[in-house]
Amino acid sequence: MTGPQRVDMLFWALLASLVALVALRQGLLLNSPRKGVADAALLASQAPPAIVIPVAEPELSASTLVPVQADSSVHRSYSDTLDSDDSIYLKLKRRGMSELQIALLNQALLPIFDPARSVRSGDRFSVRVDSSDALIDFRYIRQHKPDKPIVVDRVNDELHARQVVLPVSRRTATVQVVIEDNLANVIDSAGEGDRLTDIIADDIFGAVIDFQKDPRRGDRVSLVFTKEYLDGQFLRYDRVLLASYEGRVVSRHAVYYENPNGEGGYYDNNGASLERLFLLKPLSFRRISSRFNRKRFHPILKRNVPHLGTDYAANHGTEVWATARGLVTMAGRNGGYGKMVEIEHPNGYRSRYAHLSRIRVRKGQHVKQQQIIGHVGATGRATGPHLHYELIQNGRHINPSSVNSRGEGEPLAVHYRDAFYVKRDQLLALLRPRELAGVEVARSP
């Protein structure tokens, strides 16, 4: 091989290495699902895969994820928190980590954690490097999953990534409160969070109670639920096992039951499912700005125009979900509706979701009940961010709040009912009997 040929080969080899490093840099730099992913993934596919060991490690705890112990091999250690529009790459560069070490870290992370897609504001990490500034270990704690940190360790001069599952403890809690004005406020007064309100209003009673119009002062709410804790700190709500709503307008009771096949759901005291074809609302919200009204005065057109749906006031970007399973027949702009999704459902029903800021489904896609289909916006003829929701049956608009006024849920299979009644009575026993006065409990035959 001649001298010039050898120089050419060295040049192209060096250029290829630089391109690879730039690709890895992009993967850690861009906190966007649409940028930098392809290049980083391509490099990862060309390099030997990191060893991934998804194991539970009971000996670890949240407090061990930021190591500060003295170690003669450690040159420096530090921890940081991601800010809005921040990235792991930028944080590490500001701390003086080399491009090569960041690239090696990115390569180790990619098989189990995508730094370009998965990082969020509020996530925390810690790093240790040796006297030559080579990475010793890296710990990444996601704000929404603190019990499942990402751990990268150097073993025999190679970086190995794994997801650790930290042990959580569960405690059973009860709440018994009386409605003064609304469900959210009374749950808050009991010392619990908004997420518990959302579980009750959206996930459990979302098809059978309209919490915007049904509650009355003096209505009673009784709950049995489990909470998860990590190192003694509250982590999240695990499962609402029993929910009882006793009101002047509506009374509903829900018991969570899971059959031996692992299929679970909420049933009333007699074993009838609380599931219905439609949910009563398409998003988690706190206020209805305009209800279904065939003679409503339009604020923009300044004349009476039938308002054949419901407007939900919500913050820009609030997630919108399908109220029933079905087929997406339209996903795009539609005149005054702005960005809109239309879904075709069984029994001649169609639902529409208008003024969206972003659409997350496509025409021809099948969706499940409560699947996210878009985000609240103000596109089209809208005075501010809100969702306009319509329900149509056989070509005629109907009031969404009345869709489930008739019909009962599917009953639990006969051969599961005895076990269900036992479970129900065990949960009821956790509440004081005097607080349950008036709750009609069916007895097993």
Image: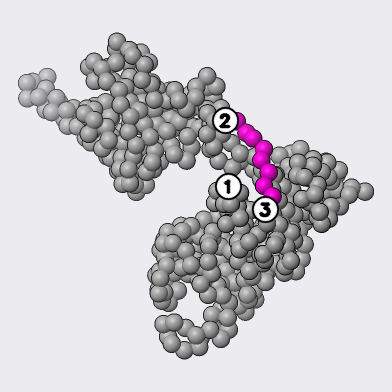
Q: Which residue is mark 2?
A: 168
- Residue at left offset 54%, top offset 59%: 284
**Residue farthest along the bottom direction in this orientation:** 303
Q: Quadrant of residue 74?
A: top left
Q: Position of residue 417 (x, y in %)?
A: 84, 46
Q: Residue at x 63, y 75 (%)?
A: 399
Q: Label 3: which residue?
A: 177
Q: Which quarter of the figure has residue 23? A: top left
Whether residue 253 can be seen here: yes
Q: Is residue 274 left or right of residue 307?
A: right
Which sits in the foreground, 305 or 344? 305
The amino acid at mark 1 is Glu
Residue situated in front as seen by the camera: 54 or 61: 61
In the rendered structure, which amino acid carries the disc numbered 2?
Answer: Val
User: Which comes sooner in the sequence, label 1 or label 3?
Assistant: 3
Whether label 2 touches label 3, CB < 8 Å = no
- Of circles 1 and 3, the one toward us is 3
The quarter of the displayed image where residue 103 is located: top left
**Picture layout, residue 119 above or below residue 213:** above
> In the image, which is nearer the foreground, mark 1 or mark 2?
1
In the displayed orientation, state which residue is furthest to the top: 72
The secondary structure that most of the magenta stretch takes on is strand
Circle 1 is placed at which residue position?
192
- Measure the alpha-carbon separation of dots 1 and 3: 12 Å
Q: Earlier in the sequence, mark 1 or mark 2?
A: 2
Q: Could you tell whether 310 is left or right of 10 in the image? A: right
Question: Please, what secondary structure does the residue beneath circle 3 have?
Answer: strand
The kind of residue on which mark 3 rests is: Val
Q: Residues within 10 Å of mark 1 (few under 14, many from 20)?
A: some
The magenta stretch is: 169-177
- Viewer-nearest of labels 2 and 3? 3
Res. 264 visible in picture: no
